[in-house]
Image (cartoon, grey):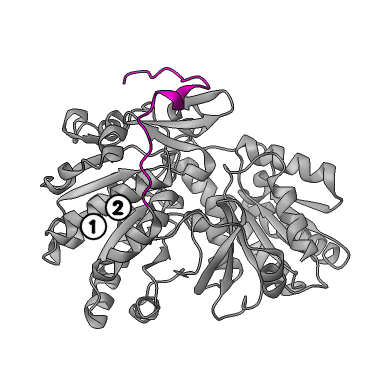
Amino acid sequence: MSAVAARGPGWADALPAARPVGTAEVRAVLPAARRLVVLDDDPTGTQTVRELPVLTRWGVDDIRWALRQPTAGFFVLTNTRSLSAADAAARNREVAEACLSAGAEERVPIAFASRGDSTLRGHYPLETDVLAEVMAQHSDPVDAVLLSPAYLDAGRVTVDGVHWLRTAEGLTPVAEGEFARDATFGYRSSRLADWVQEKSDGRIAAADVLEVGLDEIRAGELAALSDVRDGRVVVVDAVTDDDLRAVVLGILAAEAAGRRYLYRVGPSFVRARVGQGVAAPIDDARLHELTHGGRHGLVVIGSHVGLTGRQLDRLRERRSFTEVELDVAAVIEPARAEEHLREVVATAGTALASGLVVLRTSRALVTGADADASLAIARTVSAALSRAAREIVATRRPGFVIAKGGITSSDIATDALGIARAWVRGSLLPGIVSLWEAASGPAEGLPYVVFAGNVGDDDSLADVVERLEDA
């Protein structure tokens, strides 16, 4: 796989002139478009949008409820990044079948987005392969798979077909970041066409991937989006939301002409596709409405990335709290697990009466002999963390819950808090960290904050905690 050199601070100067494309232009064509169903492989895809439904289960009745809401789309939390390949495939098939059945009953045509990690971790191309297969079985074959992992708010951009991490020093190829060394979903390629070839084990050749660059996007020359056939992968550049909205308009025009697109995308494309723009974080008055004072908060940390560690260090510097550690070594040893969990729950429940509690896994990373074994360990630890959080909340209901880490956020939402239907109300920081409000169930009225492990700066966790406690 070809190496890609970093770009310095002046990288943007060489780009073609930007072309403004407003949200109103997208919203004007959405009434005739298919309803977007975002199959989210962890809950962090919601952090760029607001006022959209989220489902954590996918019964036909649940999906019909979401389809009846006056929105351009909704999320279904599949949490497939935590599953084996076989289980992820089965879940995608189950969700897609349910969505298409509900869409037929409601007479609402559906477009699927497989929302993946903006740093390229996840079951690709498995998930889009399964969705394309289900669509074909329902007489709706896919002409193209759009690949757009950009997450602009978090500094993940695509230029010249290469996916980059934006820093103060310039652009770093994504394959040089710590995410590329993921034990389960690691990779070597930063150019997305090469990455597609790598992840498909050569089934999809890099030369067969269509790359749509900023020159075409900003000149409005997007006719190529209507010419694709046979499930071809299309990679699009994106540096601004205007770029993505231009692509969305091109795709919607292609779909109106009969093309069928399947999307494998990051959070920013979803925002563009539902006709939303960058919004300010939830203001203090609205946050006060959503929260209930008088109780302290629970922060649950499962993420192991370096940024999460630095954020926790900064939280320690800025405020006092009780830190309760879930020992991974004890959790994965059956003889020790039960007693250790009881101790964790008792300590955290008592501490919540008088202050903020942080429940975290031990920081030493434990991996298995191969990718499947590592994933199995991760699932065991995540299940234990969810159980501990569930029992803590049952012992003493907190004022809010923050879940740090993508898989952690999913498991806490579904297993610990029993959230089945919810609304994304908006973000707590610009473009990152979303707050959900449960539509029903035991967590109703409890603010739930989805906080990815790999977003924000060193102060972001402390900033979010302080905003919630002030509210």
Residue numbers of the magenta segment: 1-21
Verify CB contact (< 8 Å) between mark 2 and mark 1. Answer: yes
Residue 132 seen anywhere in this rendered image of the structure: no
Which element carries disc 1, helix, strand or loop? helix
417 on left or right of 53: right
- Inspect the image, locate mark 1, and give the three-letter code of the amino acid beneath it: Leu
Q: Residue at x 54, y 72 (%)?
A: 419
Q: Main secondary structure of the magenta part?
A: loop
179 on left or right of 260: right
Which element carries disc 2, helix, strand or loop? helix
Please identify the quarter of the rendering in which residue 386 is found: bottom right
Residue 162 seen anywhere in this rendered image of the structure: yes
x and y, in percent, of residue 67 in the image? 35, 76
x and y, in percent, of residue 146 in the image? 26, 46
Disc 1 marks which residue?
A: 252
Please identify the quarter of the rendering in which residue 453 is found: top right
